[in-house]
Amino acid sequence: MKIRREINIYCPYCNEHTLHTAKIASKGKQRGLGKATRRHNRVIKGYVGSIEPKIHPKKLGKRQKVVLECSKCKKSVERVFGGRTKKKIEIKAR
């Protein structure tokens, strides 16, 4: 799926349609003191290797998320374009 780098869409902060710059959203870093991380560390304590989790079937397509930054107020809004897709989002220059 191809998306333009600059899109004219509605900004909820400015309350009007403004030009937004698009970039692909990336997954954040996992917290070191999160509950699941602490539980996983407790389970693998004492083992040389790691304990592998169960392999779950993968989804056919992920929802591709895009971060849109307003050129006027510099606030960012996340948006999902389309439903599930097998193709990666590609940002084209023009």
Image: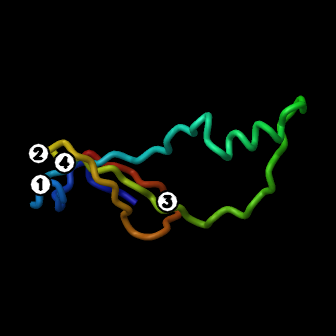
Distance between the Cα atoms at labels 3 and 2? 31 Å
Are the residues tagged 3 and 4 within 8 Å (C-beta)? no
Name the residue furthest right: 47
Distance between the alpha carbons at the discs numbered 1 and 2: 8 Å
Tags 2 and 4 touching, CB below 8 Å: yes
According to the image, label 1 marks what residue?
14
Spot occupied by residue 34 in the image (x, y as percentages of width and height): 61, 41
Are the residues flagged by discs 1 and 2 in contact, CB closer than 8 Å? yes
Q: Is residue 30 above or below residue 11?
A: above
Residue 25, position in %: x, y?
41, 47
The kind of residue on which mark 3 rests is: Lys
Which callout, 1 or 4, points to the residue nearer the camera? 1
Residue 87 numbered tag? 3
Q: CA distance from mark 1 to mark 3?
A: 32 Å
Quadrant for the N terminus in the image: bottom left
Question: Badge 4 local density, few (<14 within 10 Å), some, or many (20+)?
Answer: many
Q: Are marks 1 and 4 in contact (CB under 8 Å)?
A: yes
